Image: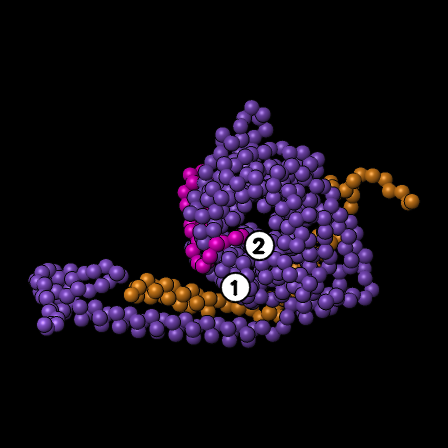
Chain colours: A purple, B orange
Amino acid sequence: MCDQTFLVNVFGSCDKCFKQRALRPVFKKSQQLSYCSTCAEIMATEALHENETLASLKSEAESLKGKLEEERAKLHDVELHQVAERVEALGQFVMKTRRTLKGHGNKVLCMDWCKDKRRIVSSSQDGKVIVWDSFTTNKEHAVTMPCTWVMACAYAPSGCAIACGGLDNKCSVYPLTFDKNENMAAKKKSVAMHTNYLSACSFTNSDMQILTASGDGTCALWDVESGQLLQSFHGHGADVLCLDLAPSETGNTFVSGGCDKKAMVWDMRSGQCVQAFETHESDINSVRYYPSGDAFASGSDDATCRLYDLRADREVAIYSKESIIFGASSVDFSLSGRLLFAGYNDYTINVWDVLKGSRVSILFGHENRVSTLRVSPDGTAFCSGSWDHTLRVREMVFSFPVCERREEG
Amino acid sequence: MSGSSSVAAMKKVVQQLQLEAGLKCVKVSQAAADLKQFCLQNTQHDPLLTGASSSTNPFRPQKVCSFL
C-alpha cells in the first residue's frame, strides 16, 4: 500500500554525556553506541579535526624527509673509493682452511668465538649447540635444545656460559661446566621471551645482560640473573634478523637489521632509535660495526653489502658485482677494517677491500650456503658456518702484490 | 574510522624525523678520510692482511718446509 519510513526515536541515557535525550545510533570502531544529537555532532566535527591533524602530520613528515635528504645531499661531496684512490692496492690473497669442524647433523645456522680466541660455539637446525676447541677440533660441550632451528648463539665474555635460542622464541643461557657428572641442560636459564623466533643474541660487555633480536619485530635488553626485561626497542616494520653491539669505547649503542630493509641504530639506555638507513632493496641478514665504531656494514638478500658511516649519516660504499646474484648472509671486518668478509647463499665467501670497493678474493670450499661468519677476537683467523653441516676456520697464508689490477666485470 | 591510532603513529614518525633532522652531520669527505686513516694506522696489526708468523699462530702447522 504505502512505503513509509518511520523514524523511531529512542529515548534514553546518552553513552557520552549520560543525559536523558533522544538517541541516535552511532558507530565507533565497529561498536554501536547511542549518542544524543549534540554529542553526535561533536563527534562528527572531532573526526573532521582528526582527519585534518592526520593530513597536516603527513605533510610535515614529507617536508621533514625532503629537508633531511637535501641536507644529506649537501654533505655528500665525495665517494669513499675516491678518497682511497691513493691508497696502495691490496695484492692477491691466498687463504687456507686450517680446521674443518664436523659434527653437526644438520645446517649450521650461527656461530660465535670465545674471547680466548680458541673456542667456538655453534648452533644448528637439528637443535644442537656445540662448543668446540678450534685448535684441536674437539667438541667440549654439546647441548640439545628443545626446539629445532637454533638460529642464534653467543659466547659470554667470561667464557663461562653460552646463550642460544631460535624457534622456541626464547634466549636461554647455559653455564659451561667441565664436571662430567653435571648435565648442562639441567642448569639452563630462560632469559628472554619473545612472541616470535629469536634471530640473534649477544651478551653486552658483561655476562649480566643480553641483547636479543626477534621475528616479532623488536629487539630487547634483558638481565640474565632475573630474566627481567630492561629495555625494548620498537621501530622495525618486520622481523629483525641481526644485531651488533658498538665496540665498547664508543658507548651504548647497537645496530639492527631487518626484513623491512632498514638498518637502525639504537640508544640502549633510552630505547630510542637514533639513526635509520634504508637503502637496501631486500632483507638485511647481517650487520657488523667497523672496528672504530664510526661505521657499520650490512649484508642483504639483494646480493650487496653496504657500508654506512654514522657521522655522515649515510651509505658511503656498496660492495657488489653483476656476477654476484645471491644474497649475502653474514659479514665481518678484519681487525683493521680494511677487509670485509661476506658469506653468500651461492656457497662462496667474498673478501672485499673496504676502502676501494673492489673484491680481493673469492673463497670456495663450502658445499652449501654460508650462513654465518666471524673473525676471531685477535684477528688471526675467521670461521664460517654453512648449511653443509660444517664450520671452517681459515687464515691468510700469503699475499703477493699485483702489478696491474684489472677489475673483471 | 581508526583516526586516533593512525594520528598517534604519524606523530611518532614526525617525532623520529625531527630527531634525525637534529643530528649534526659530518661531510662524507671527512668521514671517509677518518675511515681510511683508521685502516692505515692498524694495517700492521691485522694478521688477516699481513699474515701472522707460524711461531705465534696456533693454527699454522708446525712443520718444516722443504722445496720439492
User: At which x and y percent is residue A227?
Assistant: 43, 40
The image shows residue A255, relative to residue A103, as above or below, that is below
Q: Is there CB contact under 8 Å for labels 2 and 1?
A: no
User: At which x and y percent is residue B15?
Assistant: 39, 65
Q: Is residue A351 visible?
A: yes
Q: Amino acid at mark 1?
A: Phe
Tell me which label, 2 or 1, sits earlier in the chain. 1
Q: Identify the residue at image location x=73%, y=40%.
A: B58
Tell me the quarter of the picture where residue A21 sits. Answer: bottom left
Tell me the quarter of the picture where residue A93 sits. Answer: bottom right
Q: Identify the residue at image location x=78%, y=49%.
A: A397
Q: Where are the magenta residues, as a range?
A: A219-243
Q: Is A307 in the magenta?
A: no
- Using the image, name the chain to which the residue with label 1 belongs: A
A59 or A14: nearer the eye? A14
User: What is the chief secondary structure element of the magenta stretch?
Assistant: strand
Q: Amino acid at mark 2?
A: Ser
- Compared across the picture, whether A294 is left or right of A394 comes to left
Residue on which disc 1 sits: A277
Q: Secondary structure at mark 1?
A: strand
Q: Is A234 in the magenta?
A: yes
- Compared across the picture, whether A355 is left or right of A57 comes to right
User: At which x and y percent is residue A164?
Assistant: 53, 41
Quadrant into which the N terminus of chain B falls: bottom left
The image shows residue A137, relative to residue A42, as above or below, that is above
